[in-house]
Amino acid sequence: MTTPTPPRPGGAAVPRSRVAIDAVAAAVGLPIPEACRPGVEANLELLASHVRRMRGEDGE
Amino acid sequence: MTLWHRMTACDIARVVRARDVTARAVLEGCLADIEARAAPLVAVTQLLAERARAEADAVDARIAGGEDPGPLAGVPYGVKDLFDVAGLPTTAGSRVYADAPPSPRDAKAVARLKAAGAVLVATLNMDEFAYGFATINAAYGTTRNPHDLARLAGGSSGGSAAVVAAGLMPLALGSDTNGSVRVPASLTGLYGLKPTHTALPLDGVFPFAQSFDDVGPFTTSVEDMERVWAVLRGEPTMPHTAAELRIAGLGGRFRMNADPDQLAAMDAIADEGPLLEIPEIGRARSAAFLITAHEGGTLHRAALAKQALEYDPQVRDRLIAGALLPEAIVDEARAFRADYIARVTAMLADYDVVLAPATPGTAPRIEEPRIKIDGGMRPARADLGIHTQAITFLGFPSLAVPMKRPGTLPLGLQLIGKPGEENRLFALARELEMRGFTGVSAPAFVAETRKEGIAQ
């Protein structure tokens, strides 16, 4: 049997607040049109859930 | 009219090479069938009749001149809308690139098929920029499954799968990043290959996530797949026999999200082979999801900054989110991947082929594009690749094979091998086809065509 990867809580975070999203968007030169904002926020939530799972924070 | 194009690619090449029929006659039947029957599928984005006639005539001229016309002489085929085709813009399924400059040359895979005598007939629908498992395309429409037009064909190479499953041509090229060949192959009942990463030429293929992108063919027989594989590789391949293969099944999350028919078939094929549980499969899929999102988002960042509102909104918002993912998280995902590949490779070292479902079930209905995963309902567009994405993450080759179950919706299995060992997958697939475990069943779409007298 292989050795499980230990959970790695912490580390870099997915931007989720409006302020954090705007800061990252400005840093990478990608303005976010208002029409895109709800969808982008939902997708960032999804990515944050994948980060938690990858790090083993959801118990797998 | 004899519908020669309904035969397998190998059979078409055989009759063309034997001068039983001309490549041009095969093509004209194919074009007429597309004209008559393709529209409801929403699969063909551009018919290339003029180019195809020139290629077919060139094949016939080679034969008339005593030259070898190639191992795919006169075989009509199509390509997903992300392969460069000389003289056409490569749209990658998006109106963003509809007015891009024409490609100066064919993608390398297309050039190799042409040199082998195959005839390019059409470009085919896909999820925009290959970001989806459903072929729901805001610009070109949703591709329909030939086995039930009310259902998805899967994606992102859904147009490629639909035309082959409908019998409009025996071969099409797609691309598979996280399952975009294997998912539609499963849902439309075809053979579909995700090769060892970068084993087939990617020159002239619009990228999505370069850590995982690969070219993959759809065919209706194992023999066709092997022949196309050899042509695309550009070198002779060594056949293998199934007799000495060590086979195991994959358990855990793969079995928790599977159709009972898939489980029964896997158990029967593995015989007394063990059931293996790859650890941390959910963590692996999430890491793959993150790498894909970031690479896709980064690729499109400059275009999104200028013309975000021209993208399909669902694809656009996924890409923007990916572009905002911190590099440090992606580095974590890549580090996890390197460690994970080493561990799983060691775990599977004693087996030549492992079996897994290709999709968690049959094709979802278009009006309700959701699937059951881990007991909850999830969007098909994002989650149909639950069983393929984790294999992609390992970089292993995987051949989707159609379970033989005529009269019911198609469903596929994955035969997964070690890097560079596609020949073992073909060997097992040949054996399964011969024993009747797998095989392509014609959909009602084709049967109706026959009833109406278009085929004789």
Image (cartoon, rainbow, N blue to C red):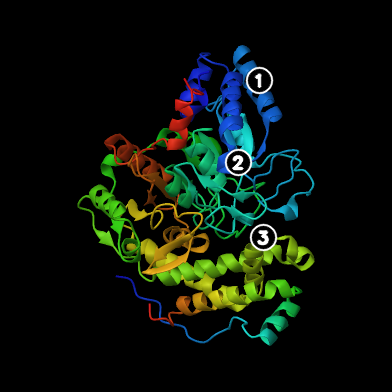
Q: Is residue B174 left or right of residue B283?
A: right
> What's the chain of the residue with tag 1?
B
At a point 59% along the width and 75% down the height, the residue shown is: A42
Image x and y of residue B131, in percent:
59, 59
* Residue toward you, B430 or B158: B158
Q: Pointer 2: what residue?
A: B79
Which residue is rendered at x = 38% and y = 81% of the image? Answer: A59
Classify residue B275 by image quadrant.
Answer: bottom left
User: In the rendered image, which residue does mark 3 sit on?
Assistant: B312
Q: Which residue is mark 1?
A: B57
Please say if B276 is above or below B162.
below
Quick check: marks 3 and 1 in contact, CB under 8 Å? no
Of the pair A60 and B189, the residue shown nearer to us: B189
Identify the element where label 3 is drawn. loop
Given the image, what chain letter belongs to the residue carrying mark 2?
Answer: B
| Residue type for callout 2 | Val
Tell me if I can see residue B140 in this picture. Answer: yes
Q: Are marks 2 and 3 on the same chain?
A: yes
* Amino acid on which the number 1 mark rests in the picture: Asp
- Measured Cα–Cα span from mark 1 to mark 2: 20 Å
Amino acid type for the residue under numbered disc 3: Asp
User: Quick one: SS at disc 2?
Assistant: strand
**Where does residue B146 sit, x and y in percent of width and height?**
48, 41
Gap in Å between the C-alphas at discs 3 and 1? 39 Å
Report whether residue B200 is seen.
Answer: no
Residue lying furthest left: B272
Q: Secondary structure at mark 1?
A: helix
Closest to the observer, B395 or B157: B157
